[in-house]
Image (cartoon, helix red, strand yellow):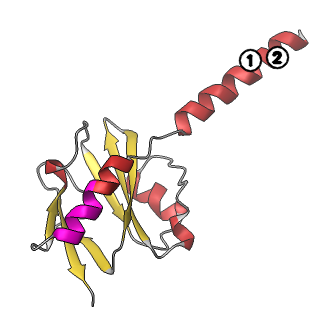
Amino acid sequence: MKKIIFIILIFVMAISYFRNNIPRNTDLEKTLSSKVDESVSNEINLHGVTEFQWTQAYLFEPYTSQETMNQQIGIKFTDSSNISQRDDIYLLVFVNDDEIVQYAEVKRHQSDFSIKQSDILTPENSIITITKHS
């Protein structure tokens, strides 16, 4: 009986681990970083630089709390970037079919990022505005 309980416990822990282990997209981070550095425009079209399926994306500012992220996304997200205590990045979280599929840490590069029309990006409305500071 103890073996069965132990196996079930290990199984539940494994499911929890894989469920919360959302991949960080470092390739996208590099692409966005180079776009900000070389940009003559003040906008980035996310749809043009993503190579995976997503239906919604959320852009979180520095110091955003875990509670605020979960409330805005509507899905529990374990933030491994610790953005609630950082001011050097923005966090992009991508959702597909009500499941978080990837995230990216976007370095600020003496810039601020914002979304024009709403709090949610979609493939059809995926423009991020860049405001550069000297």
Q: Is residue 76 shown above or below 129?
A: above
Is residue 77 found left or right of 91 in the rendered image?
Answer: right
Type of residue at label 1? Ile
At horizontal 47% and vertical 69% (from top left) the residue drawn is: 64
Within the image, what quadrant is residue 96 found in? top left
For label 1, the crowd category at 10 Å Cα-Cα, with few meaning under 14, some 14 to 19 and many 20 or more, is few
Does the stretch in magenta take in 134?
no
Which residue has dot 2 on it? 5
Magenta stretch mostly in which secondary structure? helix
Disc 2/disc 1 C-alpha distance (Å): 5 Å
Q: How many marks?
A: 2
Percent from the top left, x then y, of residue 113? Answer: 27, 72
| Mark 2 Cα shell of 10 Å, populated few (<14), some (14-19), many (≥20) | few
Residue topped by disc 1:
8
Residue 115 seen in the current view: no
Q: Determine the residue positioned at 47% across, 41% down.
A: 22
Along the line of sight, which residue is nearer the eye, 39 or 79? 39
Point out the stretch of residues depicted in magenta: 31-38
Q: Is residue 35 magenta?
A: yes
Residue 58 screen position, x and y as percent: 32, 57
Q: Does residue 20 appear to the left or right of 3 in the view shown?
A: left
Q: Position of residue 2 (x, y in %)?
A: 90, 13
The residue furthest right is 2
Quadrant of the image occupied by residue 40: bottom left
Q: Quadrant of the N terminus?
A: top right
Contact (Cβ within 8 Å) of mark 2 with mark 1? yes
